[in-house]
Image: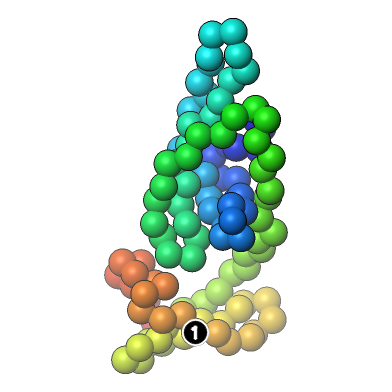
Amino acid sequence: MDDVKIGKKLLIDGIPYEVIKSEHLKVAMGKGMEKTSLKNLLTGNVMQKTFREVDKIEMADISSSSAEFLYSDDSDYHFMNTETYDQFSLNNEAIGDNKFYLCE
């Protein structure tokens, strides 16, 4: 169960999740299990899930890059990728409370 560790990105039913908590459970006369807390990377919701040794786990193909916050308007927050200079926007729902940590 090395795939289910804190910080790993998993794909469950086509939705990317990040493992934010993982606890190994040993069952008498059986194989171990991992009790996890998973954060939905699209919505930010957290769910609990237990993985058994026989469960197949699909890793999410996620990349990250550095971005610079440019400005915000009524509905969007605008950023620029610092490597490619491509600009993109995220809406208020995607930013959530992280907007309090952004500086122009």
Residue 93 percent across, percent down from the top left: 36, 75
Q: Is residue 58 visible?
A: yes
Q: Is residue 83 left or right of residue 94?
A: right
Examine the image and state in which quarter residue 85 appears: bottom right
The N terminus: image quadrant: top right
Instruction: Report crowding for label 1: few under 14, some 14 to 19, many 20 or more residues within 10 A (C-alpha).
Output: some
Secondary element under disc 1, as helix, strand or loop, is strand
Residue 20 percent across, percent down from the top left: 47, 43
Residue drawn where x is 59% and y is 69% of the image:
66
Residue drawn where x is 53% and y is 15% of the image:
26
Residue closest to the far top: 29
Which amino acid does the dot numbered 1 rest on? Ser
Q: How many marks?
A: 1
Q: Does 86 sit above or below residue 54?
A: below
The C terminus: image quadrant: bottom left
Residue drawn where x is 56% and y is 60% of the image:
15
Q: Does 28 sit above or below residue 67?
A: above
Residue corresponding to mark 1 = 89
Q: Is residue 24 left or right of residue 97?
A: right
Q: Is residue 20 visible?
A: no
User: 19 or 66: nearer the eye?
Assistant: 19
Examine the image and state in which quarter residue 29 appears: top right
